[in-house]
Image (cartoon, rainbow, N blue to C red):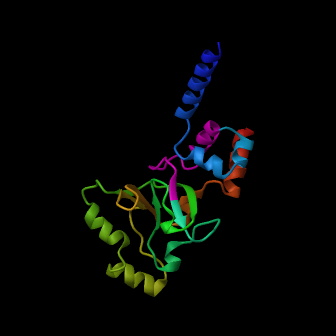
Amino acid sequence: MEDIRKLIDGLRNFNENLNVKDGVDSLFKEYPELADIGTQEQYSQYLDTIFPNSKVKDIVYHASPNKFTKFKDPSSTGLSHIWFAEKPLSSQFGSNTYYVLVNLQNPLIQSDSDYDKELRSFESPTNPDWINNYHKTGELPKYKHDGTIRSSSVDQGKSITIRNPEQAYILGSKDDIEGFTQFVNK
């Protein structure tokens, strides 16, 4: 009888894990207060409501030596984007790992036929429009893509970039915990 109970519990856990996004288990370990609010399955359902139209549905990762509650506008430091990895990063990028959802509705994707041409104008500080616009106005030029999705040799996966901090939602943050609480209490 005990063996049957173990089998049933194992099947139940397996079934629940099918409905849990990759990374949620680690996130719950790092932020145990999430488990006080709801289950990993509920949290995964909640995550689907954050950027419902994004082309990227999975949790992505950003590592930094700095602690922060919101990403900076990349143009404030002369950059054209904020970078994320498909897999958790090693500490070489910083000891603070951020679990993030990104809102990419019109990304430049590496498999696109005009990828190489578009990428040069997308993020290159050697692009005259980029240099002239940034140095004259302090603003980056406007582009038709809101980020990129491409392969990455750094993490053996995909690299994702976004244009502005409003496209990033930091998981485990105060806003995230409040949002999850509201979601569970509906």
Region of the chain picked out in magenta, as a range: 40-61
Q: Front-most of 111 and 8? A: 8
Residue 42 lies in the magenta stretch: yes
Q: Looking at the image, can residue 49 be seen? A: no
Residue 124 lies in the magenta stretch: no
Query: Is residue 26 found left or right of 116 in the rendered image?
Result: right
Residue 62, how many percent across, how many down? 52, 62
Please determine whether, in this image, residue 96 is positioned above or below residue 58.
below
Q: Residue at x 60, y 15 (%)?
A: 4
Q: Residue at x 52, y 50 (%)?
A: 59
Total number of numbered discs in the rendering: 0
Q: Front-most of 139 and 163? A: 163
Q: Residue furthest left?
A: 113
Residue 67, how many percent across, how many down? 63, 68
Residue 50, how many percent across, how many down? 59, 49
Q: Residue at x 37, y 71 (%)?
A: 123
Please determine whether, in this image, residue 137 is positioned above or below residue 8.
below
Please determine whether, in this image, residue 178 is positioned above or below residue 137.
above
Q: Quadrant of the N terminus?
A: top right
Residue 57, how many percent across, how many down? 49, 47
